Image (tube, helix red, strand yellow):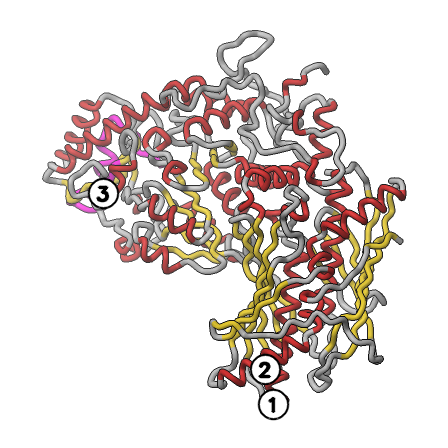
Amino acid sequence: MRNSFNIASFSELVQETKEDPEKAQFYYGARARYLPHRGVRVFATPALLGGVKSARRFGFDVAEPAAHRLSDEPTPMEMALTGIASCSVKSTIAGGSSRNVNFDALAMTISAQLVPGGDEQLGAAKVAELSCELTAQTDTAGTVLAEIAAQVAERSPNHRTATDKTETRFLLGGRPVPLPSDDTPAPDTGGSRSVARHVTWLSGAQLESRDASGKGGVLRVDQPKQLAGVDWGPNPQEYLVMAAAADIAQLAGRAQQLRTGESGEWVVEATGHLDIRGLMNVDPTAPIGLQTVIFTLRAPDGMRSADAVADVCRAAAASAVVDLIARPHPAAVHVG
Amino acid sequence: MNTPDRAAIGFQSGLEEEANWVNDLRRRRREGPRSTHNNVVDASAGASTRAVHSGVYKDPVTGAVGTPIFQTSTFLLDELSYAAFERGATRDVPIYSRYGNPSQWAVQEKVAALEGAQSAVVTSSGMSAIAGTVYALTNNGSHIITAYDVYGGTYNLMREDMPSAGREVSFVDATDLSAIAAAIRPETQLMFFESLTNPLLKAPPLREIAALARQHNVLLVVDNTLLSPVNLRPLDLGADVVLHSATKYLNGHSDLTAGVVAGSRKYADRIWAQILRFGGTLESFSCFLLERGMKTLVPRMCAHNKNATALARFLADHQKVRAVYHPSLADYPYRQLKDDVLDGYGGMVAFEVEGGDEDALKFLDRVRVPCAATSLGGVESLVSMPANTSHCSLTTSQRAAIGINGGLIRYSAGIENTEDLIADTARALDSL
């Protein structure tokens, strides 16, 4: 068990997906619920890992932008950055372990520069810049570590989800919500702020994510036991879809509030499809990042369809997490 | 130590010299673990041939015909051991008997050959196999569907341990496909059913349940204890995992407690890891007994099948018997079992005597061939009453609700002469 990482088990998964590509198709999901005066709670929903279901029991109360912040309430962007950095760290462990590299310590600091989006009233934001810095304690040569970091930048699914253009789809009442595609870089209009997380590898598939300042609560990261984890926390893809579902639920509720003076219950399910052959590089044509992130929304009872569509469109356009996923954000993995 | 072939076949070819990324890793799942010393019988061979010869450890030093007893807790460390540790592949090299021992591998290979499985795990009891399987294949937050009349030990595990382990359980009528379908939730991960229930011998429609489970990405685990692989192979019907209390028919001599689980290597490895953490390993001498017992499984099952069927026919015509439960009878409601079984229905027959529990107790006292004892599947016939053993914690009305009526006797037919069992039964019934 090099680095407490089960190489044999991972190797078996590699071979299994070579023989049967269906075994490489992983589906992760999250369900967020916004209630006025109570905010958003988001859960991971059962994952499907190559046809094998994995029940998940992880949920978070999500911090409201304007509310008093509790230390165990992450923001959607903090969850999203946790998902991206933890995926990179895990990819480093997987790749490094297969190359006989022993790590004494491994961590990544990820930072996103957020700039105001067009909809100031809703608090819209876009990600202007993303940076990822990997630090490692190992007796391996720096050149090898740099090679691994480059491989991680190329192969880590969530990193590629952030750096590539990723399709997002919104469904409301079973119908697609038409959204304009926005590939334009975030304007540098001043008033930017940064969100940064420090993700530390503990052992095997277990990691911890903290605010880079060291303050605030800890987010645990792990893998499902079906993927050599111990169900200690959500996995990186789950953090990403939970962040997306939570952000859209929160913003849709607030959009309704701004439009009508009151809001109701919004339920958002977000799913992400991952073909892990991309991470493994067993098929050069396989996509690496999440392929399509689908949001299925349920608007408050009695709401006019056109109003609900308008609120969803406004929420999608304002969401920094959706921006992080959907629009390409070039970012290398630097070794510190 | 110069014994490179003591590791599982394929272990060494899965050790790559260099890898640049994970796609260069070479290990893949294989049958077993099986060493070059474990006898492999072609899957097309008959069940009895597989039962006798599969898995037998062909000792290269002595030429022993039977598997030696590897009565050791630990094994010499060598490069293979260290490689297994480093890679997390400790199931493939004998290192420590809780992890694996050639005595266990021989049993496992025989069970896998009989059930048509890629891999098997032998455990210290049937309940160890069940608990290990259920825990290994479910997560915190999952949902399990099982039968309300499942074996008492399994019921207790599901009812008393699963909630605190974060698993919810729905208890349904296993013969009612629509009830099973209605119980499925998004988080349902596992269905656990018995191929034949105890003591009323109900047969769930396993093919249909397997199709339903597959449709919802739910794993189907089947406890095949009462039928044995001679009579039914659940994996062929679509189950993902099959398990047994090997204490019963597989061993067949009522002289050990053991369990087995069989399925794909993917699931067997996960169950193995759970079993070793729970400490449910079977020790070497019991492995020897079990492997030896399984060699005669087919002729024993033939005798069990024949005796129970003959007893059921006899009991059905007896005036002091109110009801008989056996799949061979014309009024048996679960007709699909006839299409699914390979040879027969095992040695169990249940019946109700006219005089209720009082006469049932007298019957137990007056039969001379069977022993009044719990358990089943041994060469000797056993009789017992569910009302004062396995189902004694239920009220009379609760028992009636699940079909356990007054006067119910469970008769586990052994392999004695059929005419002796019938004559003995007739004598005991006539005396009531």
**Is disc 1 in the same subunit as disc 3?**
no
Chain letter behind tag 3: B
Name the element at disc 3. Answer: loop
Pinpoint residue A1: horizontal percent, then vertical percent: 72, 38
Report how many numbered discs are placed on residues in the image. Answer: 3
Residue type marked 3: Arg
- Give the residue pinned by disc 2: A311
Residue A240 image position (x, y, % from top left): 66, 63
Magenta region, residue range: B349-374
Residue, far bottom? A261
Instruction: Give the label, 3 or 2, closer to the camera.
Output: 2
Magenta stretch: residue B359 in it?
yes
Contact, mark 1 vs mark 3 (Cβ under 8 Å): no
The disc at residue B335 is 3
Above or below, comparing residue A177 to residue B209 in the picture: below
Instruction: Quadrant for residue B230, please give it.
Output: top left
Instruction: Please tell me if label 1 and label 2 are on a single chain.
Output: yes
The residue type indicated by label 1 comes to Arg
Residue type highlighted by circle 2: Asp
SS class, disc 1: helix
